[in-house]
Image (cartoon, grey):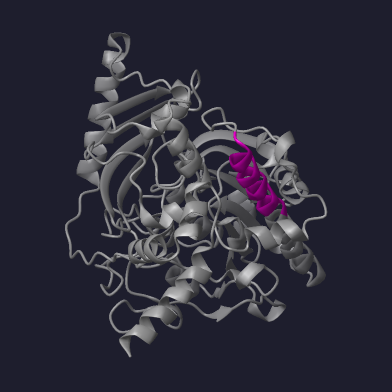
């Protein structure tokens, strides 16, 4: 392809990977109403927008593990959220930054201009942020923090845009906005109940997206000011879907489907929109291809700019997330989604402690469900069990609200996708040590419930009561009571 041939004839390009947290296709350039994202619009207009990119897990750390290695998380025993972090990777697996450094790249984590400096890593194998890597005694992933300079060329910078992640800062960011979203004027997804507190929560999310878009602009400005932009590829993605009902943590579109925009206007024909099915691990392989690194044989990702790039399905999985030890599997194409739920007894609304703090819509709709005030589509999330199989025609039913698994007309397609999924599992099988980590969210939730009944009631009414500051207060409480 012209693009890769051209790169081969010049010096190695710099690469900046912008990773927005908890981000579905909720951008203006993807047709999202009510939100303005001029910097990402410009990036898409001058670059290539991919419309069918999916992560391999809808939860941050397994998804990030797959991207850091270019390998599906099941193969590397990294599928359980924030677990196995004392266990070194099995050979031959290595972080992709190892391969970049082998060919002379300076690897940089974070950026001084973005919210909390964007240094998040969050992967499920033994590692540390900075230092060398050999996989035995040394486990460093990056060379330095926060700043890229001419002297670093060629460089790779991974920058986390954290502001869109759920956090106590959402109210403060909203207050900073010159044009905060009016909850009464926004459009909600159809499976959300139309309620003032849900509207406010959605408005806050849109405020975070617009703040994040400004951060993207700051990165581009810095590259331009330092005369680095002409030889820099910028990639924008999400690490998993939005943190709301049916989103982060679930194998629906809102959990797996992420934006992918690639900017390199001197080499890419601007304004392209590609419909290829892309796995997040393909982005990792593409980065190595940009850097003229031979993609390791163990990669499950493929370079998306190779002439022979083709992918029919992305294999998605859901496993342990905090105290909820679930197991679901899915395959997604540009037309079909098939989900198999192995633990049907665990409902979608599993009352996971961490999410109790961060999903006002769940509290509001849970109450409305008990009062029988939700419609059919809104009720789906609150059923007492998950179906064992789910099949969706994404062209006719993009919100995945009409399960076709029990429809005889789709029996042949169901069997075809069932077999395809089994084949995926066989090709991604791994057994290894399992060191699950259950965080303190459950204990914190029970403490709030027992000691702060008024605050707990506010949570049940659909108000975010502040996870971070309550966590700090709880730690102080434990320290005092130990004495």
Point 36% across, 80% down: residue: 478
The image position of residue 339, as x and y in percent, is 32, 33
Please tell me whether the stretch drawn in magenta is mainly helix, strand or loop: helix
The image position of residue 92, as x and y in percent, is 28, 66
* Quarter of the figure with residue 385: top left
Outermost residue to the top:
409
Outermost residue to the bottom:
483
In the displayed structure, 203 sits above or below 65; it is: above
Q: Which of the image's four quarters has the C terminus?
A: bottom left
Observer-nearest of 389 and 355:
355
- Please tell me whether residue 130 belongs to the stretch shown in magenta: no
In the displayed structure, 447 sits above or below 19; it is: below
- Please tell me whether residue 205 belongs to the stretch shown in magenta: yes
Q: Is residue 214 left or right of residue 146?
A: right
Point 43% across, 29% down: residue: 371
Say if residue 399 shows up in the picture. Answer: yes
Q: Which residues are magenta?
A: 195-210
* Quarter of the figure with residue 335: top left
Point 46% across, 49% down: residue: 280
Observer-nearest of 431 and 479:
479
Q: Is residue 314 left or right of residue 101?
A: left
Circle count: 0
* Quarter of the figure with residue 110: bottom right
The image position of residue 14, as x and y in percent, is 63, 66
Q: Is residue 100 left or right of residue 12?
A: left
The image position of residue 62, as x and y in percent, is 37, 56
Say if residue 310 shows up in the picture. Answer: no
In the displayed structure, 43 sits above or below 170; it is: above
């Amino acid at each position: 392809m012209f693009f890769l041939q051209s790169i081969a004839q010049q010096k190695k390009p710099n690469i900046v990977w912008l990773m927005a947290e908890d981000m579905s296709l909720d951008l203006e350039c993807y047709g999202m109403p009510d939100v303005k994202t001029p910097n990402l619009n410009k990036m898409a207009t001058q670059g290539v927008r991919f419309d069918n990119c999916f992560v391999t897990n809808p939860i941050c750390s397994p998804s990030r593990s797959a991207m850091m290695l270019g390998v599906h998380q099941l193969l590397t025993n990294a599928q359980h959220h924030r677990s196995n972090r004392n266990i070194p990777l099995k050979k031959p697996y290595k972080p992709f930054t190892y391969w970049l450094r082998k060919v002379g790249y300076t690897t940089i984590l974070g950026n001084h201009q973005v919210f909390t400096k964007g240094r998040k890593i969050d992967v499920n194998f033994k590692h540390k942020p900075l230092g060398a890597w050999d996989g035995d005694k040394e486990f460093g992933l990056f060379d330095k923090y926060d700043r890229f300079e001419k002297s670093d060329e060629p460089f790779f910078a991974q920058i986390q845009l954290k502001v869109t992640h759920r956090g106590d800062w959402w109210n403060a960011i909203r207050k900073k906005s010159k044009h905060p979203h009016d909850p009464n004027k926004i459009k909600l997804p159809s499976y959300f109940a139309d309620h003032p507190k849900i509207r406010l929560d959605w408005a806050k999310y849109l405020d975070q997206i617009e703040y994040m878009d400004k951060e993207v602009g700051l990165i581009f400005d810095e590259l331009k000011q330092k005369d680095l932009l002409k030889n820099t590829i910028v990639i924008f993605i999400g690490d998993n879907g939005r943190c709301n009902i049916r989103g982060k943590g679930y194998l629906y579109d809102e959990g797996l489907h992420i934006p992918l925009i690639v900017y390199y206007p001197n080499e890419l024909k601007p304004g392209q929109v590609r419909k290829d099915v892309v796995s997040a691990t393909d982005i990792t392989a593409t980065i190595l291809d940009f850097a003229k690194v031979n993609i390791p044989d163990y990669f499950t990702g493929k370079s998306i700019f190779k002439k022979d790039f083709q992918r029919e399905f992305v294999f998605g999985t859901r496993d342990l997330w905090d105290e909820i030890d679930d197991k679901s599997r899915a395959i997604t194409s540009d037309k079909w989604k098939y989900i198999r739920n192995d633990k049907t007894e665990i409902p979608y609304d599993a009352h996971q402690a961490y999410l109790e703090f961060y999903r006002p819509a769940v509290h509001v709709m849970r109450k409305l469900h008990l009062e029988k005030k939700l419609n059919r589509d809104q009720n789906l999330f609150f059923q007492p069990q998950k179906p064992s199989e789910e099949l969706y025609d994404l062209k006719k039913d993009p919100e995945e609200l009409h399960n076709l698994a029990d429809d005889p007309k789709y029996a042949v397609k169901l069997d075809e996708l069932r077999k395809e999924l089994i084949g995926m599992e066989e090709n991604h099988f791994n057994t290894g040590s399992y060191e699950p980590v259950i965080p303190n969210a459950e204990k914190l939730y029970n403490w709030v419930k027992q000691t702060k009944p008024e605050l707990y009631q506010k949570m049940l009414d659909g108000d975010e009561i502040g996870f971070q500051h309550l966590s700090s207060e709880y730690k102080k409480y434990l320290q005092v009571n130990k004495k």
